[in-house]
Amino acid sequence: MAACAIGGHLRGETMSAIRVVTENRKARHDYQILETFEAGMVLTGTEVKSLRAGRANLRDSYAAVENGELWLYNMHISPYEQGNRFNHEPKRVRKLLMHKSEILRLLGRTREKGLTLVPLRVYFREGLAKVELALARGRKTHDRRAEIAAREARREMERAVRGRAGRTRW
């Protein structure tokens, strides 16, 4: 059967291309990631346009469950430059969309000692803005140091193996 182009992609093939807008790399350093979730975002028109232009920042942002709804706090989306009187507030609280059962599960998990919801990245999937949330536990300074030491040791072993593999010729 021949493939037929429809709307820029092949018939029967889903457009699951993900275009990452912003990432929170520091979260992976500061927190121990236990589980990840995907949530939709409720946005205004100018927020979507700013996200498509890549003008967002996840630093110091977090999510919380309140009254059975999931909310994202402190995410900065820069005002859209061509937007005039209908521009958005950059750090407004944004509602996240997940199934009710998942939200209630997250509520139970975040009530545990030391667990929090941290956004890892914002991206577009099939034209819709999504946020990847992580159920995470904060790391202590000595935990971070131990992780860095383990990573360095692993890299050193890989270098040694690569160096040895290059010298074993007949």
Image: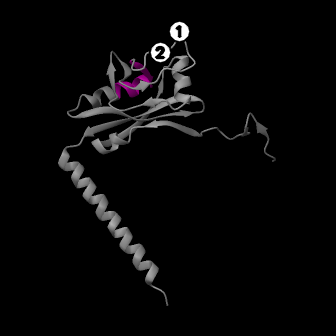
> Is 99 contained in the magenta span?
yes
Q: Are marks 2 and 1 in contact (CB under 8 Å)?
A: no
Q: Residue at x 43, y 15 (%)?
A: 89
23 or 15: which is nearer to us? 23
Residue 31 visible from this viewpoint: no
| Tag 1 residue | 85
Q: Amino acid at mark 1?
A: Arg
**Within 10 Å of the Cα at label 1, are there few (<14), some (14-19), or many (20+) other Cα atoms?**
few
> Is 43 contained in the magenta span?
no
Give the image location of residue 2, x and y in percent.
Answer: 81, 47
Give the image location of residue 111, x and y in percent.
Answer: 24, 28
Question: Element at badge 1?
Answer: loop
Among the 4 quarters of the image, the one containing residue 63:
top left
Determine the CA span between mark 2 and mark 1: 9 Å
Q: Is residue 166 above or below residue 33?
A: below
From which residue to which does the magenta span run? 93-105
Among the 4 quarters of the image, the one containing residue 12:
top right
- Of the numbered discs in the image, which one, if any, rests on residue 130? none
Give the image location of residue 125, x and y in percent.
Answer: 56, 34
Q: Residue at x 39, y 32 (%)?
A: 58
Q: Amino acid at mark 2?
A: His
Q: Is residue 76 above or below residue 140?
A: above
Q: Residue at x 56, y 24 (%)?
A: 49
Q: Residue at x 78, y 39 (%)?
A: 5
Q: Is residue 37 above or below residue 67?
A: below
105 or 37: which is nearer to us? 37
Q: Nearer the viewer, mark 2 or mark 1?
A: 1
Question: Element at badge 2?
Answer: loop
Give the image location of residue 110, x and y in percent.
Answer: 27, 30
| Tag 2 residue | 88
